[in-house]
Each structure stands twice: as structure tokens, then as C-alpha cells.
Amino acid sequence: MNAEQLVTIYIKMRDARVKLQREFDEADGRIKEQQEQVTQALLEMCKETGAEGLRTPAGSVFKTIKTRYWTSDWGSMKQFIKDHDALDLMEQRVHQTNMKHFLEENPNLMPPGMNVDSRYSITVRRK
């Protein structure tokens, strides 16, 4: 096969994946909405009966509390973390773009334990 044929095949495959992903996302969204309605009905049953859970022949339901935390002021949050030496409040992942820029600006500084994986890839654009 020549390059033109490979690019044509690549674009068709990419388009097919996008179509499948869109179809999946739409179907999954509908199911998630229905699931949320069932969740609310089960929570209401627990509330009405004062139960922390329900047992049925089909399965069991347990009521739990899920709490999320976030900030609307990252500057203050960063300062709070510094002030209280609370780095464990952050998730452990490296911001890829910021690390790339940092290393470009500081080529002689490599954080201990830093792993780097660079590999060639291609980008295919439609004609």
C-alpha cells in the first residue's frame, strides 16, 4: 500500500471510531439518566422507611454519603497547602504540559524519580 491509501484508511477508521463514540455516549447518557431516576427512587424509599439499606431477592441497596471537595480559589489553596505543609491534599500526578515547559526551561533539573517516555507518533489531517 502507498501512503495515500494508508492515510485514506486511517481517516475512515478515525471517523468510524468518532461515530461509534458519539453513539455510545448518547446511549450511555440515556441509561445514566434512567439510572439516576432509579437511584433517587431508592433513596426516597430509604428515607421513607428510615432504613440505611434495603435487601431484595434481586440484590441489596446500601445508602452511603459521598463527599466531594474542590476550590474556586487555587491561589489561596496553594498557599494553604504550603502554609500547612499539606502536600498530601493534592492528587499525585504530573501536569504534562507544565512539566515539559519546566524541563525545557531547566534542562539541568530533573526531579528525582521522574520517568520520561518519548516516542514518535503521527498526526493525520483531512485534505
Image: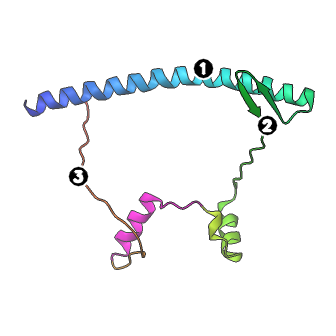
Do residues under tags 2 and 3 come within 8 Å of each other at their CB atoms? no
- On screen, residue 125 versus residue 45, left or right, reads left
Disc 3/disc 1 C-alpha distance (Å)? 39 Å
Q: Which region of the structure is painted magenta?
A: 91-107
Residue corresponding to mark 2: 63
Q: Quadrant of the C terminus?
A: top left
Residue lying furthest front in this view? 57
Q: Which of the marked residues, 1 or 2, is nearer the chain's N terminus?
A: 1
Residue 3 location (% of width, % of height): 11, 34
Residue lying furthest left in this view? 2
- On screen, residue 4 versus residue 109, left or right, reads left
**Nearest to viewer (mark 3 / mark 1):** 1
Q: What residue type is labelled 2?
A: Lys
- On screen, residue 78 versus residue 107, left or right, reads right
Residue 88 location (% of width, % of height): 63, 67
* Residue situated in front as seen by the camera: 66 or 49: 49
Q: Which of the marked residues, 3 or 1, is nearer the chain's N terminus?
A: 1
Q: Which of the marked residues, 2 or 3, is nearer the chain's N terminus?
A: 2
Q: Can residue 77 be seen in this view?
A: yes
* Residue situated in front as seen by the camera: 66 or 8: 66
Q: What residue type is labelled 3?
A: Tyr
Residue corresponding to mark 1: 30
Display colour scheme: rainbow
Disc 2/disc 3 C-alpha distance (Å)? 48 Å
**Nearest to viewer (mark 1 / mark 2):** 2
Residue 74 location (% of width, % of height): 65, 61
Residue corresponding to mark 3: 120
Q: Which amino acid does label 1 sit on?
A: Arg
Residue 114 location (% of width, % of height): 40, 69
Structural crowding at the residue carrying mark 1, measured as other residues with C-alpha within 10 Å and reported as few (<14), some (14–19) or many (≥20) = few
Q: Which residue is drawn at 92% across and 32% down?
A: 50
